[in-house]
Image (cartoon, rainbow, N blue to C red):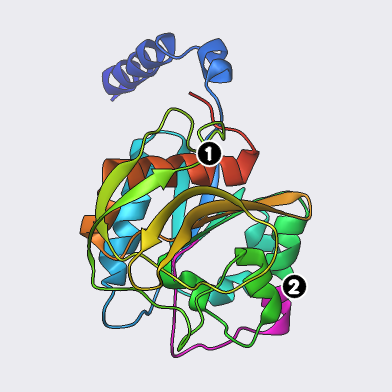
């Protein structure tokens, strides 16, 4: 027994010899991301979509991601304090609204300096909550917003100076091209595309300031295939980082 204890202590000493507190201090702390997902329309495989989004963030090495399948986590101000950014991918027809406390907590989370990254149809959530649309910058409105047939189209990078799209070129993607998103607030468009359905150029990735915090709106991502596009994954990783911190580290 004494010999076993000696061996275990020796193993711990050897392991600690490879650990340097100085090296740990030099490593940047991971960004704490809360990915809220859940029920969706039948056209969207939401489990695949949320997992593909989570994997892109985790593989970057920059994020500690926690997944929640219920937006009522927003009711807990204490729970939200643990995170730097909310990645919102949920659209639930069964939950057309959330309680007032949850609404207040989400808005204050961003107003006080943290980040909000909203993706694809998630902007259609809570249709009667006007301020949610302002937080998203533009909002999918059922019966007004829409898209043509899913297919390959060219996305144009119109702001190559922003940290999210720096160094990116125009790219092709196989996805839905969202059009007629509603809203009038000021947005900073990073990526856009011409829609044959609306006959207009539509913003697909854009940012806005909300209080002291930041929103990134990513309209790409109809399914796992669309989310696997390398350029879309780059936008997700950089976008969530920028929403959380206001910068993108190389």
C-alpha span from label 1 to label 2? 32 Å
The residue beneath circle 1 is: 159
Give the percent coordinates (x, y) of residue 249.
53, 26
Give the percent coordinates (x, y) of residue 122.
47, 71
Look at the image and tell me whether residue 83 can be seen. no
Please tell me whether mark 1 or mark 2 is closer to you in this view: 1
The quadrant where residue 12 appears: top left
Query: Which quadrant holds the N terminus?
Result: top left
Q: Secondary structure at mark 2?
A: helix
Give the percent coordinates (x, y) of residue 13.
40, 13
Q: Nearer the viewer, residue 157 or 53?
A: 157
The residue beneath circle 2 is: 104
The residue at the point 51 percent across, 13 percent down is 23
Query: Is residue 99 magenta-colored?
Result: yes
Count neighbours of disc 2 (C-alpha within 10 A) and say few if under 14, some if 14 to 19, many if 20 or more.
few
Q: Is residue 229 above or below residue 92?
A: above
Q: Nearer the viewer, residue 247 or 112?
A: 247
The residue at the point 56 percent across, 31 percent down is 161
Give the percent coordinates (x, y) of residue 55.
32, 47
Q: Is residue 28 above or below residue 198?
A: above
Looking at the rendering, the stretch of residues picked out in magenta corresponds to 88-103
């Amino acid at each position: 027994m004494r010999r076993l204890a000696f061996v275990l202590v020796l193993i711990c000493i050897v392991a600690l010899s490879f650990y340097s507190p100085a090296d740990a201090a030099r490593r940047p702390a991971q960004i704490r991301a809360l990915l809220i997902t859940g029920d969706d329309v039948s056209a969207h495989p939401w489990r695949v979509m949320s997992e593909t989004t989570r994997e892109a963030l985790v593989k970057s090495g920059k994020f500690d991601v926690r997944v929640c399948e219920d937006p009522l986590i927003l009711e807990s101000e204490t729970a939200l304090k643990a995170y730097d950014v909310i990645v919102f991918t949920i659209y639930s027809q069964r939950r057309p609204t959330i309680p007032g406390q949850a609404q207040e907590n989400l808005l204050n989370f961003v107003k006080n300096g943290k980040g909000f990254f909203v993706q694809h149809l998630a902007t259609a959530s809570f249709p009667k909550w006007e301020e949610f649309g302002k937080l998203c910058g533009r909002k999918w409105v059922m019966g007004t917003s829409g898209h043509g047939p899913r297919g390959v189209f060219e996305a144009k990078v119109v702001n190559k100076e922003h940290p999210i799209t720096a160094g990116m070129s125009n790219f092709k993607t196989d996805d839905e091209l969202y059009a007629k998103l509603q809203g009038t607030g000021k947005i900073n468009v990073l990526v856009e595309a011409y829609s044959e359905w609306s006959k207009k150029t539509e913003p697909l990735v854009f940012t806005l300031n909300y209080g002291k915090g930041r929103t990134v709106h990513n309209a790409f991502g109809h399914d796992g295939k669309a989310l696997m596009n390398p350029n879309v994954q780059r936008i997700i990783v950089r976008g969530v980082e920028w929403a959380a911190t206001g910068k993108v580290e190389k």
